[in-house]
Image: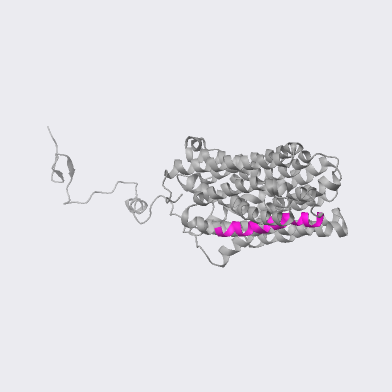
Amino acid sequence: MALHDDNTAKDPDGHIVLSSSEPAKSVPGSSNTEMSKLRSPNQPNTPSPPPPPPNGGLVAWFQVAGSWCLMLNCWGIVNAYGVFQAYYQTKLLADRSPSSIAWIGSIQAFLLLFVGALTGPLYDYGYFHHLIAAGSFLMVFGMMMVSLCTQWWQLVLAQGLIVGLGGGCLFVPSIAILPTYFSTRMAFTIGIAGSGSGIGGVIYPIVFQELENSIGFAWATRVIAFVMLATLSVPLAVMRPRLKPSAVRKLFDSAAWSERPYSFFAFGGFFGFIGMYLPLFYISVFAIQHGMSSRLAFYLLPILNAGSIFGRIFPNYMADKTGPLNIFIPTCLALALLSFAWMAIYDTMGLVVFTVIYGFFSGTFLTLPFSAVVTLSPHMGVVGVRMGMACAIGSLGLLVGTPVAGAILTHGWLALQAFGGTALLIATIAMSASRVSKVGWHVSAKA
């Protein structure tokens, strides 16, 4: 027998419901008022989303200035290694092969990218200032130790290992903090911060060249260390993380390799880094061996890095409008063609023009990949890990590229130049495949 009373009613489907004639009674021992507050739409259980980036203001631009100083040192000293390569090859380590000397700079550049990828979780845990402090100490200490070195293995430890580890600690903070302050001009602000590495590539070779002739190798290197100490104090003073990431960054995302756009991009980055750095390491030695005065030959590297400053800013500004891959692919192709054109350039004026143009496109090559990874990621939650993976793969290209080129140099300069041009041409094809996989053959598509 069905049981019901006046406080029950049936809905159109026949289900028994409470009648509206009398409110439901509270359950003893419970607080309906508190429960209703917890379930109120005005107080959801999920945390509120973080405020949007300010995209300007004094504090935001202080972060750009701090990132600029970090780039000045971590990438600037890598871009300046060509002047050390020439000095070691012609004076301090004249008995060593170009390939063995190149290992010093390639280890330094490799660690900058590789360690930078590994320190991502530390940044996510909130160790921003710890990374800057540790990286600053290692870089300054490493360059001070370089001033005492007289043998190859000592330089590998001091300049390759210690300075490289320091740069790796600085690299992630210099990039990761900017998207939290800028969204609409992300590529542009990264380009401005990245111009610091071009300035470092101008200042440090000139300081070394001028002071080495007057006060010697040891004190010239110490002056560079003191400049590092002064400029690295700025980020510690002005940089402030705005948001803590919602989750700790993973070190590996296996799903990325099932996506052809990202896989092609990473493959292209490996070959691009193999070929792109060869003029930065060897242009001064090439010029000296082809009759240029040693003083002017040493200045080719600052000229190249000066050209890279403009390449880091203006193409990044355009990338915000057209898409980073649409700028990056012509950049790789231009570097490949310039590497092949280098085969026919021997005179002073031709080398100066070559270094300026090559420097412009090398600056674009070094800053656009970070924006490209954002474009190739399905959502922002995987950008960090995918950027780290791309950096790790690119670091392997940096590690092997210049020493292999030094070994190829035993067969002549044409072999080295062809090696660099071919690697960059492969990078161009891979980047093009990445774009086609992402947006198809539509020329006007933003990618």
Camera-side residue: 312 or 348?
A: 348
- Colouring mode (rainbow / by chain / secondary structure / one colour): one colour
As drawn, which residue projects farthest toward the bottom? 58
Q: In which quadrant is the N terminus drawn?
A: top left
Image coordinates of residue 112 in percent, x first then y, are 67, 46
Residue 88 visible, this angle: yes
As drawn, which residue projects farthest toward the top? 1
Residue at 87% over, 45% down: 150
Classify 252 as above or below 365.
above
Classify 98 as above or below 198.
above
Image coordinates of residue 431 in percent, x first then y, are 52, 43
- Assess whether residue 304 is covered by the magenta stretch: yes
Count of number-bearing discs: 0
Q: Is residue 181 left or right of residue 207?
A: left
Residue 72 visible, this angle: no
Q: Is residue 376 left or right of residue 194?
A: left
- Assess whether residue 150 is covered by the magenta stretch: no
Image coordinates of residue 95 in percent, x first then y, are 86, 40
Instruction: Residue 352: name its quadrant.
Output: bottom right
Camera-side residue: 380 or 437?
A: 437
Magenta segment, principal secondary structure?
Answer: helix
Residue at 76% over, 53% down: 140
Highlighted range, magenta = 294-314
Camera-side residue: 107 or 300?
A: 300
Instruction: Residue 298: name its quadrant.
Output: bottom right
